[in-house]
């Protein structure tokens, strides 16, 4: 299915499901090379698009434009198994969604009908929709969070509000649509929610009754800002594509003043926190999260090797059961919910010291003057990328504040203040698009004695900066004890 977000896209996805096929979402605006790789890997029998999208699969695959297709002579009754190539079963593939791969090539996650049904059943049981509800369809359908936006409301008689093609990246437009269309249920990536709240008021947000948020760590302050405008409940959800959208959930309460947990497993799902030897870890001890149960994907399309690596035998389940290695660090809290700590691949070693970047980010967003924060390692330095709330950020005050709660080696040596964090096409943080830091002297006073000139020249040579003045600090310019 290759088209932008539209009513036709919704119809095409339903048509594939009813016919007994599996849909592969393709964004016509993505690079032709990426889309070509997806089509080569998925090997579809048909491409559904629209005449206005002008999508060219570049192969012999037939293309049907759903907006101009002539339905004359076709039966309008329900489709039966007799008309399908094969009967629809719970184990059949419902969709293959391609996500970014570590090799640079996207990997296709194949999810079965039964997994989707389990997801939707849990959502309706725990957060029931009624016919009066209006659900916002805003997530790109190449992103797995779109699955429940597509299928949940219409299966229970609620309405779907289809946002504009690029609305998911436009907080002004999202705020407008929510108010104009009286949206009652919506989901956001936390960074987009934070930005959208800026443009909502009590009037436009008044129709909201429930907001789901996932894909990134949710800050308690963001929930509080939304809560000042609406009584809508906020549900923090977590789940990799490989576990059918959402594997854990947590309804935020007033007690979550600092951080928001990711909660406990959804129906028909088990969450296991294990060490490197696949042994369960005690409460409060970090470990890698493994997920098992009905919502596990079938595997990666055409990648049996990668499927075997990520979907491993479940030693705690029945014969033949699997569990998925998420690569996420979590811990069980004393009250029985999961706390997200970060990615195992975001846990870095800097000058021999193990650092959890998520811990630094969490300390930064606790400050009232910082709306969002990302920390990366650049060279041998920790770089903090900051988005201010309203008032300007005092970097010296930020550094001093961190020094009171974190060891010195976890305090970023350089801060970069941005108007907004870069987002990818799915509305999630694009770490690769963060600008490289520019380290330069602040207020320059030239050295005045031969000894000062020698020291300044040595600092500049070691640190790789153009010049060093009397007032510059070695560590503030990116120095460390190993090169001192």
Image (cartoon, grey):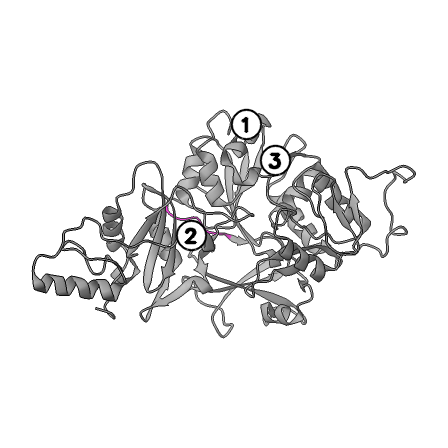
Q: Residue furthest left?
A: 449
**Disc 2 from disc 3: Cα separation:** 27 Å
Q: Is residue 169 left or right of residue 254?
A: right
Identify the residue at image location x=65%, y=69%.
Answer: 318
Q: What secondary structure characterizes most of the magenta part?
A: loop
Instruction: Tell which circle, 2 or 1, labels the residue nearer the N-terminal end.
Output: 1
Kindly report which numbered mark, 1 or 3, lies closer to the viewer in this rendering: 3
**Disc 1 from disc 3: Cα separation:** 15 Å
Identify the residue at image location x=48%, y=40%.
Answer: 193
Residue picked out by circle 2: 434
Identify the residue at image location x=42%, y=45%.
Answer: 219
* In the rendered image, the vertical position of residue 287 relative to residue 419, given as above or below: below
**Residue 72: x, y in percent?**
90, 37
Badge 1 crowding class, 10 Å Cα cut-off, few under 14, some 14 to 19, many 20 or more, is many
* In the rendered image, the vertical position of residue 139 relative to residue 34, given as above or below: above
Q: Quadrant of residue 59?
A: bottom right
Q: In terms of depth relative to the viewer, which is nearer, 416 or 29?
A: 29
Kindly report which numbered mark, 2 or 1, lies closer to the viewer in this rendering: 2
Q: Is residue 7 left or right of residue 431?
A: right
**Residue 234: x, y in percent?**
50, 40
Tell me the SS state at disc 3: loop
Residue 248, magenta (yes or no): no
Label 2 close to label 1 by CB (< 8 Å): no
Give the extent of the magenta segment.
Answer: 258-263
**Residue 89: x, y in percent?**
79, 56
Kindly report which numbered mark, 2 or 3, lies closer to the viewer in this rendering: 2
Residue picked out by circle 1: 179
Instruction: Tell which circle, 1 or 3, labels the residue nearer the N-terminal end.
Output: 3
Q: In terms of depth relative to the viewer, which is nearer, 72 or 435?
A: 435
> Which disc is residue 164 wearing?
3
Count the numbered circles shown: 3
């Amino acid at each position: 299915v290759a088209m932008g977000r539209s009513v036709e896209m919704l119809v095409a996805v339903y048509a594939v499901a009813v016919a007994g096929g599996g849909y592969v979402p393709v964004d016509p605006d993505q690079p032709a090379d990426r889309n070509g790789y997806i089509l080569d890997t998925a090997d579809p029998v048909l491409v559904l698009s629209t005449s206005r999208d002008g999508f060219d699969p570049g192969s012999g695959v037939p293309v049907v434009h759903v907006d101009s297709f002539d339905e004359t002579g076709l039966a309008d009754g329900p489709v039966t198994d007799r008309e399908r190539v094969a009967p629809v079963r719970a184990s059949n593939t419902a969709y293959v969604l391609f996500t970014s791969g570590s090799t640079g090539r996207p990997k296709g996650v194949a999810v079965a009908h039964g997994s989707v049904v389990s997801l939707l059943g849990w959502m309706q049981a725990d957060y029931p929709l009624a016919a009066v509800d209006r659900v916002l369809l805003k997530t790109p359908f190449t992103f797995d969070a779109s699955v429940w936006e597509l299928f949940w409301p219409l299966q229970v008689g609620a309405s779907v509000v289809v946002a504009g093609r690029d609305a998911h990246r436009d907080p002004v437009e999202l705020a407008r649509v929510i108010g104009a269309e009286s949206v009652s249920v919506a989901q956001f990536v936390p960074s987009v929610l934070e930005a959208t709240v800026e443009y909502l008021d009590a009037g436009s947000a008044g129709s909201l009754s429930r907001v789901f948020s996932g894909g990134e760590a949710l800050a308690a302050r963001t929930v509080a800002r939304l809560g000042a405008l609406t009584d809508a409940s906020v549900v923090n959800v977590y789940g990799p594509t490989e576990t059918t959208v959402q594997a854990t959930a947590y309804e935020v309460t007033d007690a979550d003043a600092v951080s928001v947990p990711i909660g406990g497993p959804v129906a028909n799902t088990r969450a296991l926190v294990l060490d490197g030897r696949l042994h369960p870890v005690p409460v409060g001890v970090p470990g890698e999260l493994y997920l098992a149960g009905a919502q596990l994907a079938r595997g990666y399309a055409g990648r049996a090797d990668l499927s075997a690596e990520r979907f491993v035998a479940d030693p705690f389940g029945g014969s033949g059961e699997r569990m998925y290695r998420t690569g996420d660090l979590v811990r069980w809290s004393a009250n029985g919910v999961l706390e997200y700590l970060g990615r195992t691949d975001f846990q870095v070693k800097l000058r021999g010291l193990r650092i959890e970047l998520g811990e630094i980010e969490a300390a930064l967003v606790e400050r009232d003057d910082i709306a969002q924060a990302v920390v990366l390692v650049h060279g041998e330095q920790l770089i903090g990328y900051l988005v201010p709330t309203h008032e300007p950020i005092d970097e010296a005050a930020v550094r001093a504040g961190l020094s009171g709660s974190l060891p010195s080696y976890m305090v970023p040596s350089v801060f970069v203040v941005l108007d907004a964090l870069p987002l990818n096409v799915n509305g999630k943080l694009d770490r690769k698009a963060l600008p490289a830091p520019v380290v330069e002297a602040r207020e320059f006073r030239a050295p005045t004695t031969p000894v000062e000139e020698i020291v300044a020249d040595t600092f500049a040579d070691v640190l790789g900066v153009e010049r060093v003045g009397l007032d510059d600090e070695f560590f503030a310019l990116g120095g460390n004890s190993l090169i001192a």
